[in-house]
Image: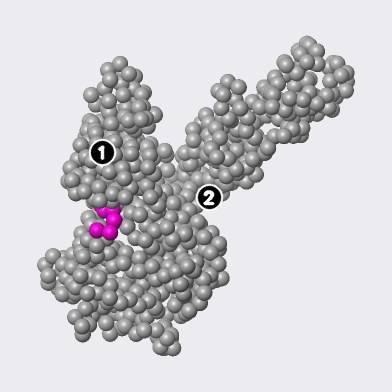
Amino acid sequence: MKRDKNKNRKLRNNNRFSTSKITGVVTPNTIVNLLDKKPQQRYSVNQIAKYFKVSGSLPKKELKIVLESLAAQGSILQFSTKYYQSAKNIVHITGTVDHVNPNFGYIISESLENDVWVSTRNLKGAIHGDEVEFVVYESEKKGRDEAEVKRVLYRKNTQMVGRIELSTRYAFFVPNNRKIYTDIFVSKADTMEAAHADRVIVEVTDWAVNNGNPEGKVIKVLGASGNNDAEIHAIMFEYGLPFEFPEDVEAAADRIPEVIPKEEIAKRRDLRSVTTFTIDPENAKDFDDALSIQKLENGNWEIGIHIADVTHYVRPKTKIEEEAYQRATSVYLVDRVVPMLPEKLSNKLCSLRPHEDKLCFSAIFELNEEAHIVQKWFGRTTIHSDHRFTYEQAQEVIESKEGNYAEELELLNTLAYKLKNDRYNNGAISFESVEFYFQLDEDGTPLGMQPKERKDAHKLIEEFMLMANREVATFVYKNRKKESDEPKTMVYRTHDLPDQERLESFAFFAKRLGYNVSTNRESLAKSLNKLNVEVEGKPEQNILESQAIRVMAKAKYTTEPIGHYGLGFAHYTHFTSPIRRYPDMMAHRLLQHYLEGNGSVERAPYEEKCKHSSEMEKRAADAERASIKYKQVEFMQKFLNEEMEGFVSGTTEWGMFVELKETKCEGMIRLAAIPGDYYYFDEENMQIVGRKTGVTYMLGDDVKVKVFATNLDKRTIDLALVL
């Protein structure tokens, strides 16, 4: 372990300052005064010694001890152990550490326009995610602003998950988090008898300073590295996902009655006699939406979109509500679901199971033959699902025109096509990227990968859910006495305009592959939809579609009604999945509040909840990607040293990513490992270029590679280029 064993001794030596061999004119006050005369200038020990005419190795050592003591007290500033500066007029700023690699990172602060570069040695023991107090100074050598941490204000990661490495006398813990580059020392007595290379959770007991190793103890052994449950639990802990519900939350759910009181049914619109069914994935248990259909006397159709009335069961200021808010979303890992609500609610009380009366919040529309809305109604209902379809079963009925509710499904499918065409005509963008899922054995070992096919049955459900979400948002937005009034507070799902610079880069890239994409944001939707048709079934389809998605802004939750650019909707919310998304619960409550004739609620608390929900959504997506990446690496172990076909899916300054055509897994070819030339990253053209030969590799290029290595700990696949 690296330790600053001399720190206390140096501070004690400062107490002997008056008897040192330094000339009598040198005192702590005279040093501070010297530095304060020019507060922007930094001085080396030699410069200070020269000023005070201090010579000789021992006096200089004692001068350095005094300087370090003054720095420790905050009387002066110390940089890189070599330079000192006045603390006068220095502003201490707070920010968060983003430790991008072992040598340096950035500190992100709301007080500054740009992130500030910081060397690892100047982090002073802070690690990725920590909130710190720091100062900014101009680097003399590099001519740029740099940061130095003065103290850590908040430790984000006091507990970490990773691998334990045992030696004869001690152990080291290696964190899973790839942005934490410091191993943690663990005494043999604090390992909980974990075996070498086990996945464990460690709690830090002593944070190191001056870049030494922190100390910690094992608080939970997850199991052997490579064991499916141990690895997935490690990913869950890494992303802060709970392993189980607190006992008081489970107990509160168990106390909820299962029988619906007659007086509750009497308060609602009773739709139990109307033909109703659900269409969901085969392995689904939480059916949170159902469709009903009936023909009206005027020849139009009444279509009901019925959503589980979760907020009837989950009341504000309850344990279940608090837990649902904290989780904010269900998380779908590669082999399991981490639900937002306890099972009794998600799979039983709220799930719209067939042949059971259920409480719903419904959006009911009268549609004509062109799928135009004639009338709409929103409110609480009671339904009774007549049938449960899987997507595959519904698709078979649609294609064969035979089976249960064949006429109803055919009509719904026809209306869905018209709704989709209207969306595209009004500016929606078609994103149809192919997703894959793993086939796992009973131990969680990946056996293969299959594409998730999106057929008419999937799109049918999607169109009616989109319509319900749009119309609920529009209803609340327009729910005011006059247009000049401020819109009432609502939770919106928004999607901003694409970044112009990214759009132009994508258009340039598409042009090199032979496709034209408009850089005018007004005509972009039409241009991208045309591109999607042109590339369908071609080798470059995946790379173009994935790059197009990256051009787009990230969708988020907010109370600001700025619309949804990708869908082409002026107003949009999430209303249709309250079993698995907290924002849908907020939308339900707000809609009911306004249906009862109440005025707008305070915006700020809802905006804060929207921000939290967006953050939790990102965390869930990151965890899902991590679980998929782990299974990809595990799956690719069986292809070691095999040659495979792929295409360049990404380029960076350190290498190029290649997606393998057969397995759809992605690996990296490091630039330094490409033989025959020195290759560099041409950022402007997003390509890799050989300095001598001029050979280039750009996004979409076909390449032949060999699977060189796999690393389950880092979740990486290393590839070698086959020339």
* Residue sitting at x 23%, y 80%: 294
Instruction: Where is residue 171? Give x, y as percent.
Output: 55, 36
> What is the x, y in percent for residue 680?
36, 24
Q: Is residue 54 above or below residue 377?
A: above
- Residue type pointed to by label 2: Lys
Q: Main secondary structure of the magenta part?
A: loop
- 210 or 161, nearer to the observer: 210
Q: Nearer the N terminus, badge 1 or badge 2?
A: 2
Q: Which residues are magenta?
A: 425-432
Q: Which residue is mark 1?
A: 510
Q: For residue 186, say whether it is visible.
A: no
Residue appearing at x 53%, y 45% in the figure: 160
Q: Which residue type carries mark 1?
A: Ala
At horizontal 58% and vertical 30% (from top left) the residue drawn is: 145
- What number is the disc on residue 220? 2
| Image coords of residue 141 (percent x, y) | 58, 20
